[in-house]
Image (tube, rainbow, N blue to C red):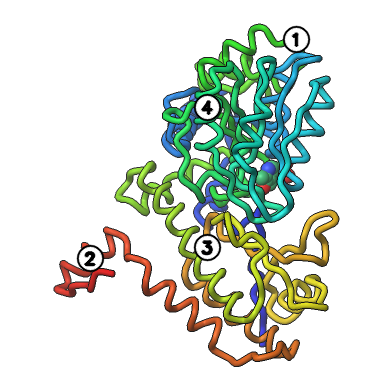
Amino acid sequence: MIRKTRLFTPGPTPLLPAAQFAMAAADVHHRTPEFRALFLKVLRELKSFVGTRNHVILLTSSGTGAMEASVSNLTSPGDRVLVLTAGKFGERWVGLAKAFGCDVDVVSAPYGQTFNLEDVRKAIKIETRAVFMQATESSTGVRHNVQGVAELLKQSGRDAALVVDAITGLGTTHLDMDAWGVDVLIGGSQKAVMIPPGLSYLAVSDRAWDLMEISLNPRYYFDLRKERKNAAKGESAYTPSVALIAALGAAFDYIAGQADGDLAQGRAKLVENAESCAAMTRAAVEALGMRLFAPHAPAAAVTAVLPPAGLDSGAIVKELKSRFAAVITNGQGEMKGQIFRIAHLGFFDYMDTISLIGALEQVAYSLKLPGFAFGKALIAAQNVFASRAPDEAARRDLAMAGVSLPTR
Ligand SMILES: *Cc1c(COP(=O)(O)O)cnc(C)c1O
């Protein structure tokens, strides 16, 4: 049979065709009224997508650039900061904070788990200037409790800024930075917004803008104050990735289009979509007799799975690729061979999820997993899908067609 390549990776994720067309057509100079109109539209939409009244800065860089910008703009050498880490991306915060001379306290949780909030509470010191964490840790498939940490910080009465890498959290989990008091929320283009890598964005609170005035760390390309000034005029400080910005505009049109033109509702739908794909996948792999790596706090962005005992997870990654051209990811770093990861963020739907589970059954069959029978994983996923309430729009459409649905 022929094989169609499909990405099931937690970034880059599958591309939205309309965004690819917009990129191809983006033959625009960045100091023109045409570009300014596009840039201002995308910046406005970013606020709705993030769900904030704060300024949002868009950078031409991968997600790590925005992480670095939050460290270099908010801290000074010798500042005490707290990093909450439970995986490769948490460890990136530690590396970044050290690179900019911070004195780093760390609260860690084992891979596959989230932090104990009591440990976090104890680690917040009078001198703590900033707390860095992930919303979802893509290397382990874990969701962290951002609201819980924000609440702790408030209760502590300390003045530390809360910086959240929501690069795979945005569009897969509910986040309310304004209500919770998050100071910086970071996103990236190759994740839930369905476009290629190369853009990152940060929503920045008033308090964080104030902190930038006293921070002594060096910055040049990633000077957020300079970007904010330029953004007010519809421009970026340096040549931006015009094509990716056009793609982002098209992606927001698509996401808003999923909810009658309301982008905030569209984002909620995207979250619900990721939750459904993730729940189907979790049920399916468990039905195949495999164990979830993060059963207690699973992220909707990506599901991490332990391979059957005695098997290297790479074997499953390889089989899916060679037989079905389905690209999933192995574990990162020392987790290589220990887990495999299947993504749900962005442009995935029911059909994608069901077909991957079908392919996974074929792989399990050829690996002769004990107790295997065709259909078990698919049945589990089908039941999950059927038991999740259809969304309101679908309900309305069906009601108009005279079909009433049983309530759960
Ligand atoms: C993808 C990702 C990043 C950013 O990685 P880049 O390769 O720099 O875009 C950061 N944090 C998390 C949680 C991610 O999933």
Disc 4 residue type? Val
State the separation of the CA atoms marked 4 and 1.
Answer: 22 Å
Whole-angstrom CA distance, mark 4 to mark 3, is 26 Å
Classify mark 2: residues with Cα within 10 Å, few (<14), some (14-19) or many (20+): few
Tell me if mark 1 has few (under 14), some (14-19) or many (20+) residues whose alpha carbon lies within 10 angstroms of its own.
few
Q: Are marks 4 and 1 in contact (CB under 8 Å)?
A: no
Figure quadrant, ligand 1? top right
Q: CA distance from mark 3 to mark 1?
A: 43 Å
**Would you name the residue on which mark 4 appears?**
56
**Figure check: 327 above or below 118:** below
Mark on residue 348?
A: 3
State the mark number for residue 397.
Answer: 2
How packed mark 3 is, by other alpha carbons closer than 10 Å (few <14, some 14-19, many 20 or more), is many
Q: Position of residue 273 (x, y in %)?
A: 45, 59
Q: Position of residue 155 (x, y in %)?
A: 50, 24
Give the mark nearer the N terminus: 2 vs 4: 4
Task: Point out the image quarter for the C terminus.
Answer: bottom left
Q: Label 1, on which residue?
A: 216
Nearest to viewer (mark 1 / mark 2) = 1
Confirm if mark 2 falls within 8 A of ligand 1.
no
For badge 2, the amino acid type reads Asp
Q: Amino acid at mark 3?
A: Phe
Name the side, left or right, on which 225 lies relative to 347: right
Left or right for 210, reference 37: right
Q: Distance of mark 1 from mark 2, alpha carbons?
A: 57 Å
> Which residue is depicted at the point 78% across and 77% down?
309
**Which badge, 4 or 1, comes first in the chain's sequence?**
4
Identify whether 211 is placed above or below 331. above
Q: Nearer the viewer, mark 4 or mark 1?
A: 1
